[in-house]
Amino acid sequence: QVQLVESGGGLVQAGESLRLSCAASGSAFSNYIIAWFRQAPGKEREFVATINRVGDRTYYGDSVKGRFAISRDNVRNTLYLQMNSLKPEDTAVYFCAARRSVTPTITPELYDNWGQGTQVTVSS
């Protein structure tokens, strides 16, 4: 099992940027596929981005493609999400998630390790 703790959320204006971090502990971080999901009030959890174990392949949800960038540091056991050109519709709780696998996936049910989430609020 791996424990995940997100940080970096906050309140920003539309067009601004934020960088989220997800610190991992408890198991070999490099053995895990890591992803970001988000959930807005009254909506289902939405896939944001995922990255393979070595960090050279990334996948994004359509709503964030071209604006967000996922990366990982397997030495610092940390996952990042750089969010640029933020929009009010990006407002949500952002979660990082991990699965011990070689295959990235956008399906939240296939991730069995989750952080507690960090709130991102974008004002117009």
Image: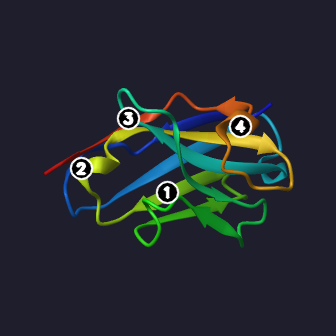
CA gap between label 4 and label 2 equals 32 Å
Q: Quadrant of residue 80?
A: bottom right
Camera-nearest label, 4 or 2: 2
Neighbours of disc 2 within 10 Å: few (<14), some (14-19), many (20+): some
The answer to which of marks 4 and 2 sits earlier in the sequence is: 4
The answer to which of marks 3 and 4 sits earlier in the sequence is: 4
Camera-nearest label, 2 or 1: 2
The answer to which of marks 2 and 1 sits earlier in the sequence is: 1
Q: Position of residue 58 (x, y in %)?
A: 65, 67
Q: Can you identify the residue that label 1 sits on? A: 81
Picture residue at 33% right of the left edge, 49% below the top: 90
Give residue 88's mark. 2
CA gap between label 2 and label 1 equals 17 Å
Identify which amino acid the numbered label 1 is placed on. Answer: Leu
Picture residue at 49% right of the left edge, 57% below the top: 81
Q: Can you identify the residue that label 4 sits on? A: 25
- In the drawing, does residue 69 fall left or right of residue 112? left
